[in-house]
Amino acid sequence: MTTRLAELNERVGELRRLIAAPPPDDADAVRELYCELVDRYRDDSDALAILRPIGDEIRRLEVAGDLPSTLVARSDRRKRT
């Protein structure tokens, strides 16, 4: 397993643990970590294929009221040429 894939799997595990038990004092934690991962792997279609269903799950849980609905504003991190 490549280092990048191992790191992704570890972070996805962390995200799934947050989804299962979001910290009561940090309503943005789940969405923040998800957005961080999408930003990090934005140019990796295989990684995004793993992350997209998790994003769908997060949205379903937000709509159901099981996760706080938050908006995380992130700056554009792509280098401008």
Image (tube, rainbow, N blue to C red):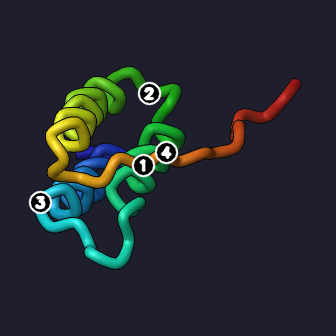
Mark 2 lies on residue: 44
Rendering quarter of residue 2:
top left
Mark 1 lies on residue: 70
Q: Is residue 39 above or below residue 22?
A: above
Secondary structure beneath dot 4 equals: loop
Rendering quarter of residue 77:
top right
Say which label, 2 or 3, has the lower sequence index.
Answer: 3
Mark 4 lies on residue: 71
Of marks 2 and 3, the one in the foreground: 3
Q: Nearer the viewer, residue 61 or 17?
A: 61
Residue at point 28%, 24% (across, down):
49
In this orientation, does residue 54 appear? no
Mark 3 lies on residue: 20
> How far is disc 4 from disc 3 in space, using C-alphas?
19 Å
Q: Amino acid at mark 3?
A: Ala
Q: Is residue 59 left or right of residue 43?
A: left
Label 4 packing within 10 angstroms: few (<14), some (14-19), many (20+): few
Say which label, 4 or 3, has the lower sequence index.
Answer: 3
Question: Residue 19, percent across and down?
Answer: 19, 56
Residue at point 22%, 66% (across, down):
22
Q: Do tag 1 and tag 4 residues touch (Cβ < 8 Å)?
A: yes
Q: Is residue 70 left or right of residue 47?
A: right
- The total of numbered circles placed on residues is 4
Say which label, 1 or 3, has the lower sequence index.
Answer: 3
Question: Residue 11, percent across and down?
Answer: 30, 56
